Image: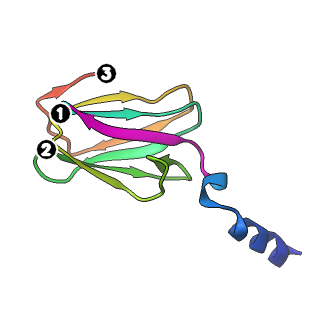
Amino acid sequence: MHALLLLALLALPARALALGNVQAVVRNGVLEVTGDEEANVFRIAASGPGTAVVSVFEGTTVNDGLTAVTLSGVSSLRIDTGAGDDRVELLQLDLPQTSR
């Protein structure tokens, strides 16, 4: 019986297991990360001057995908996590301007 359950879970599309989605875009130098009403879990980390990587965990997706997104031209940051029970980690960001 356990083998049947495992096969059924593996057959589900990745989005069916996801716990929310965050959208990450750069507009006029501002990295805008917007969550939804689900429990989003994500990290924003530096990846060189003006470059950030948004990684997702625990089933959260970024820009509707499961792989990390690298964005360039970043000079400031704006995060709106939405209404969920979210967890956000910021790593080694050195931005001249950061807004909420």
The kind of residue tagged 3 is Arg
Magenta region, main secondary structure: strand
Q: Residue placed at 70% from the left, 63% from the top?
A: 12
User: Disc 1 or 2, which lies upstream in sequence?
Assistant: 1
Numbered disc total = 3
Quadrant containing the N terminus in the rendered view: bottom right
Q: Which mark is residue 50?
A: 2
Q: For this rendering, which residue is in front, 26 or 19?
A: 26
Residue 62 place in picture, x, y as percent: 44, 47
Q: Which residues are magenta?
A: 18-27
Residue 37 image-quadrant placement? top right
Q: Secondary structure at mark 3?
A: loop
Mark nearest the camera among 3 and 1 is 1
Give the answer, above or below, for where 21 lies relative to 29: below
Label 1 crowd bin: few (<14), some (14–19), many (20+), radius 10 Å: some
Label 3 crowd bin: few (<14), some (14–19), many (20+), radius 10 Å: few
Between the residue at mark 3 and the residue at mark 2, the CA separation in whole angstroms equals 18 Å
Q: Badges 1 and 2: C-beta atoms under 8 Å apart? A: no
Q: Residue placed at 65% from the left, 61% from the top?
A: 13
The kind of residue tagged 2 is Gly
Between the residue at mark 3 and the residue at mark 1, the CA separation in whole angstroms equals 15 Å
Q: Which mark is residue 100?
A: 3
The kind of residue tagged 1 is Gly
Between the residue at mark 1 and the residue at mark 2, the CA separation in whole angstroms equals 9 Å
Q: For this rendering, which residue is in front, 85 or 47?
A: 47
Does the segment drawn in magenta span residue 23? yes
Q: Residue placed at 56% from the left, 42% from the top?
A: 20
Residue ranking furthest to the bottom: 3
Label 2 crowd bin: few (<14), some (14–19), many (20+), radius 10 Å: some
Residue ranking furthest to the front: 27
Mark nearest the camera among 3 and 2 is 2
Give the residue pinned by disc 1: 29
